[in-house]
Amino acid sequence: MKKKVLSGLTVAVVLLLMFALVTGCAPEEEVAPPPEEPEEVEEPEEVEEPAAFPEGDVEITIGFDTGATADVLARGLAPRLSDLWGVNVIVNNLPGANQATAYHHVADADPDGHSMFIGVMQTMGQHEYYGTIDVPLQDMEWLGFLLYEPYAIFVSEDSEFETIDDLIARDHVTYGDTGIESALQPFIVTFLDAFDIDFTFIPGYAGGDLHGATLAGEIDFMARGPAYMHRLGIEDEFRVLVTSSDERHPAHDYAPSLTEVAEQYDKPELQPDPLFDLAFPIATTPGTPPEVVEEIADTIKYLYTEDEEFMSWLEEQGIHWDADPDLIGHDVSEDLVAQYIQSYQEIGLDELYERLD
């Protein structure tokens, strides 16, 4: 009996040990980590598509009738821009209010680069000075200066004034132009004042009337750009006494520059000044996208530097003498516009026009 009990106990112990081994060695069940919260995916920012240009007809507006220098520039640019862009480029002659009508037409257009303005900077600077334009000049998107032409004093070929010395020797002279607000006034009045020459300004002359009055001796001289006279083909009927430039002009290299006259007669006030020249800038509507402004400016610069057809046209018109590709571009032209605005603030237009009125 005792033996059987021991054997049963032994079996029970063995079974207990086996159970312990089995349960102790069994691999622990791996507990899955809690699911990670998904990272927030940022939605891509909306990227504005570059403004398409051009999407239709492009218009170049000028404040002059046909034949004026601004008109010639516009009609020279239009066909080449049309070829490059594959759209119609139209010249819109819109005279009125001394270029302000044309200026406002472009300033108030849709800001997409499809409307451009070419004007005379000296005249627009006067509008800015007197507040006769609704949109400030510096609000416009300037693209470049197409032409920077000096003034020249022209007399009739048979005039008694053979050289600038003959003009300086006179006590009184007469000259004429369209009106007292003409862009030539700062140059002419500064020049005559430097030599204490009394003068009479006769307004009301325009175009051919002015040329005829000079040839007929009704006035002693007129001031015009060399390229303008070259295009008209009448420069041989006149003689140039001086140009407003710092060097002699290639079209009339027999005539002294303003710098030469200033040095010869010790007249520092006669140093060349931007207000003494004719500048023709081009601009588009305020708020036009920068990439469109850059596209237009780059295209114009290409015409001035690489397009053989356009460069040949510039030479035919006599514009190549005074067309500087370095003045094409948004930044450089904006800086020049700011300089003109400052110059008109300094020169004192009110006093000047009181003398001429």
Image (cartoon, helix red, strand yellow):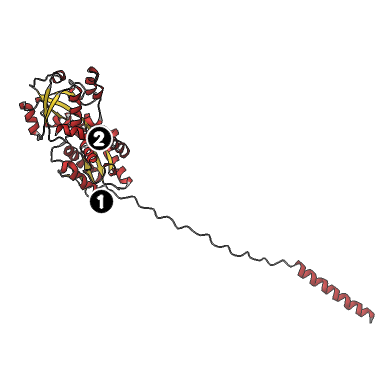
Residue 207 in percent (x, y) is at 10, 34
Residue nearer the viewer, 148 or 21: 148
Horizontal side, residue 36 vs residue 202: left or right: right
- Inspect this view and state whether residue 315 appears: no
- Quarter of the view holding residue 145: top left
Q: Who's the residue at 91% across and 77% down the image?
A: 6
Q: Residue furthest right?
A: 2
Residue 22 in percent (x, y) is at 77, 70
Q: Who's the residue at 44% across and 56% down the image?
A: 44
Task: Give the secondary structure at mark 2.
Answer: helix
| Vertical relation: 223 (above or below) 290 | above
- Quarter of the view holding residue 353: top left
Residue 308 in percent (x, y) is at 23, 34
**At label 2, which amino acid type do we have?**
Tyr
| Vertical relation: 117 (above or below) 184 | below
- Inspect this view and state whether residue 245 appears: yes
Residue nearer the viewer, 144 or 150: 150
Earlier in the chain: of badge 2 and badge 1, it is 1
Residue nearer the viewer, 164 or 54: 164
Which residue matches tag 1?
110
| Vertical relation: 328 (above or below) 16 | above
Q: CA distance from mark 2 to mark 1?
A: 30 Å
Quarter in which the C terminus is drawn: top left
User: Which of pointers 2 and 1 indicates the residue nearer the eye?
Assistant: 2
